[in-house]
């Protein structure tokens, strides 16, 4: 491993260990899995053919990605027709610069943001603050994290790792007053504080859950209403769109809406689903004067052309996180990237390079719970296996002892006489190992550190068959 | 990045990716996922709205709807209201009702002549939002609000209390039906903002405890004239 990778790997293990030893995080995580997991099942029960509906959503994603360039062009034409502007950004830095440029050109200074993982992915806040803009996250959970200087730990419940007393302390320290340890009162405090920000903001930045090509519409799904405020009150609205989020027609949208909220939170629909098409129309009293859509690649085209293209179907519902036994134990932060959980273990190495995150494809038991929970049935376990395989072909990642053992094994399997000799030897030597488990293997301490190796049986199947089986 | 360069890269990637298309069955029936509203859409609508934390009330006449609205004005005693201009609200005599209860009445025609900062201040200060809806969706318990001048998006967003009054003809059974209506009106005519509202503003960000009203209205009343 490269030094950097060793460092990341160690960091993952330490973070995972810390998470496992944190009782309040553990109880938050089990609550998350129990509550959301159950709600999710109940909500899907009502759709008689939910499996088929999920197949349809999957088919739409697949067909759209096959001609993504054409759909992007249609989207652009539609946005222009409604008085909006489209900008293309090759990577995160490009997108940050573009957005800063739009704000500067509009003479903006105060920016409000609604929750968007894509803006987290490109580290937009840091870039805008460096330009001197005042940026405020307005999703309640994200706001707490911004004040605390932390990263989100879940796709839809970003502050799930914090308990109420911790939040009261974080917000109270910021306000310079003591705040009650009470969910309602803390929410009321956030409402008051953030209303002032909405009133003075000149720019609102949102992500987009979907973009409809034929109408030029961006779709935002939220529960709090901050997404509506962000896109209605300031005079400029900028939406950042991961380019894989395009769907061709308005008629495709209900297919996704029917599965998204059910998978995310077990709701039939989230509280607010906003379809925003361009800037305000003549005669309207609210809504922005300017609408900008920033279309982001940032590694997506590389994924689109390759075997893990299916990861682009993801609608960021978070169901695979709630279903995952590993996530439920270590939480979101241990994954190290912006996207946590099973899909994060696929996306993070794809976006920022496999060699920087060698541990992630292994942070899964491959039990398949993620794929079963996924509203678009993404084959996450299969993709993790593919990534593991790729990892073994990286020269910097190779473990020489492990590779030598696999080579030896393969050679032996191709030579029956040698294989027989080897099993004969094994059963008569380590086959007699006391207890049947080997706790330490020379040169493979990393492997046996957390697992035991099964010793061969004292008698091979072949010998047993010769003795007993033919009778 | 230049547009052409960006799109060329996507074009190449999309073409290369076609080798990895997933197999999805091709016998999926057209209406898969359609839930519908059952025999009584108005009742279903009310039940779903109550299930998501709203307060839905079924009434049998416009007379009764006016009484229900009056009761809410007494309960919340707002100083000012931000209202849609809508035929149903006019038939109910909304303006007169607000006047009787001493509630300041703000709607498009009264706000439009004001300068922008003043109009905005009035909107932010409103204590109740009174609207109808474009459509109501029985299956999910949602209101579909298409914004136009006179049907402002903020009326259902800024005040802490939102009251909507809908009548039977506005109810569609399923989410799919609502989108069929939008399509029938012509996709090129889609309003600048179409929002589906399904409940009072909620957050589960604190220990997954449901807390209402963090940004949007925490109280959500719907009066359904059946
Ligand atoms: S991979 Fe599937 S389950 Fe996981 S967040 Fe994406 S859409 Fe949801």
Image (spheres, rainbow, N blue to C red):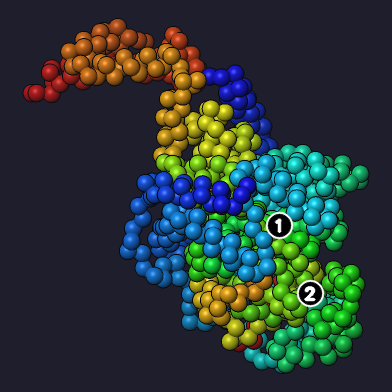
User: Is residue A77 rendered to the left or right of residue B78?
Assistant: left
Whether B36 is drawn above or below A89: the answer is below
The answer to whether one can see residue A26 in this image is no
Q: Are marks 2 and 1 in contact (CB under 8 Å)?
A: no
The residue positioned 80% from the left and 49% from the top of the image is A135
Quarter-wise, where is residue A404 in the image? top left
Q: List x then y, in percent, for residue A21.
A: 64, 29
Chain of the residue that carries numbered disc 1 in the rendered image: A
Image quarter (top left, top right, bottom left or bottom right) of the C terminus of chain A: top left
Residue A454 got which mark? none
User: Is residue B55 rendered to the left or right of residue A70?
Assistant: right
Residue underneath mark 1: A238
* Mark 1 crowdedness (10 Å alpha carbons): few <14, some 14-19, many ≥20: many
Residue underneath mark 2: A285
Circle 2 SS class = loop
Quarter-wise, where is residue A150 in the image? top right
């Amino acid at each position: 491993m490269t030094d950097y990778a060793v460092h990341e790997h160690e960091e993952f293990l330490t973070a995972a260990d810390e998470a496992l030893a944190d009782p309040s995080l553990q109880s938050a995580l089990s609550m998350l899995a129990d509550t959301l997991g159950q709600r999710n099942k109940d909500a899907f029960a009502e759709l008689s053919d939910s499996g088929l509906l999920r197949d349809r959503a999957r088919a739409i994603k697949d067909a759209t990605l096959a001609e993504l360039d054409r759909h992007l062009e249609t989207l652009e034409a539609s946005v222009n027709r409604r008085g909006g502007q489209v900008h293309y950004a090759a990577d995160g830095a490009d997108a940050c610069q573009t957005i800063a440029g739009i704000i500067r050109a509009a003479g903006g200074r105060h920016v409000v943001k609604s929750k968007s993982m894509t803006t987290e992915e490109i580290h937009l806040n840091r870039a805008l603050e460096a330009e001197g803009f005042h940026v405020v996250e307005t999703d309640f959970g994200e706001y707490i994290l911004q004040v605390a200087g932390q990263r989100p730990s879940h796709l839809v419940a970003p502050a799930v790792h914090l308990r109420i007393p911790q939040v009261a302390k974080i917000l109270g320290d910021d306000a310079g007053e003591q705040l009650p340890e009470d969910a309602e009162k803390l929410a009321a405090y956030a409402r008051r504080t953030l209303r002032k920000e909405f009133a003075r903001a000149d720019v609102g930045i949102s992500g987009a859950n979907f973009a409809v090509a034929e109408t030029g519409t961006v779709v935002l799904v939220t529960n709090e209403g901050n997404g509506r405020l962000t896109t209605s009150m300031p005079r400029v609205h900028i939406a950042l769109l991961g380019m894989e989020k395009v769907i061709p027609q308005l008629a495709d949208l209900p297919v996704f809406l029917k599965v998204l909220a059910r998978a995310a939170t077990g709701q039939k629909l989230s509280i607010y689903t906003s379809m925003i098409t361009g800037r305000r129309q003549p005669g309207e009293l609210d809504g922005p004067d300017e609408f900008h859509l920033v279309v982001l690649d940032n590694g997506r085209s590389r994924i689109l052309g390759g075997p893990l293209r299916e990861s682009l179907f993801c609608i960021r519902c978070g169901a695979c996180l709630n279903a995952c036994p590993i996530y439920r134990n270590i939480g979101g932060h241990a994954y190290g990237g912006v996207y946590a959980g099973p899909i994060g273990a696929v996306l993070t190495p794809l976006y920022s390079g496999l060699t920087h995150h060698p541990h992630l494809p292994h942070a899964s038991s491959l039990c398949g719970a993620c794929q079963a929970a996924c509203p678009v049935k993404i084959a996450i376990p299969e993709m993790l296996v593919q990534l593991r395989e790729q990892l073994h072909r990286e020269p910097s990642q190779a473990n020489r002892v492990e590779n030598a053992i696999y080579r030896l094994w393969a050679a032996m399997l191709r030579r029956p006489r040698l294989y027989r000799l080897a099993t004969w030897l094994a059963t008569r030597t380590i086959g007699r190992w006391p207890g049947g488990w080997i706790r330490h293997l020379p040169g493979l301490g990393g492997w046996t550190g957390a697992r035991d190796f099964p010793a061969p049986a004292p008698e091979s199947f072949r010998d047993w068959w010769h003795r007993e089986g033919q009778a | 990045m230049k547009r052409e360069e960006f799109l060329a890269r996507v074009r190449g990637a999309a073409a290369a990716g076609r080798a990895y298309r997933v197999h999805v069955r091709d016998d999926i029936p057209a209406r898969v996922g359609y839930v519908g509203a059952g025999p009584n859409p108005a009742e279903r609508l009310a039940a779903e709205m109550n299930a998501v934390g709203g307060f839905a009330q079924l009434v049998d006449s416009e007379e009764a709807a006016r009484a229900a609205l009056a009761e809410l004005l007494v309960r919340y005693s707002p100083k000012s209201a931000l209202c849609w201009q809508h035929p149903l609200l006019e038939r109910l005599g909304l303006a007169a009702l607000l006047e009787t209860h001493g509630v300041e009445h703000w709607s498009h025609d009264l706000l439009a002549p004001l300068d922008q900062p003043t109009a905005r201040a009035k909107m932010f200060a409103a204590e109740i939002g009174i609207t109808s809806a474009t459509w109501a969706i029985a299956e999910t318990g949602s209101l579909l609000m298409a914004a136009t001048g006179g049907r402002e998006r903020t009326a259902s967003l800024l005040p802490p209390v939102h009251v909507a009054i809908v009548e039977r003809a506005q109810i569609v059974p399923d989410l799919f039906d609502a989108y069929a209506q939008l399509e029938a009106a012509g996709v090129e005519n889609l309003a600048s903002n179409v929002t589906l509202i399904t409940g009072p503003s909620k957050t589960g960000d604190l220990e997954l405890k449901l807390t209402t009203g963090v940004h949007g209205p925490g109280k959500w009343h719907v009066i359904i004239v059946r």
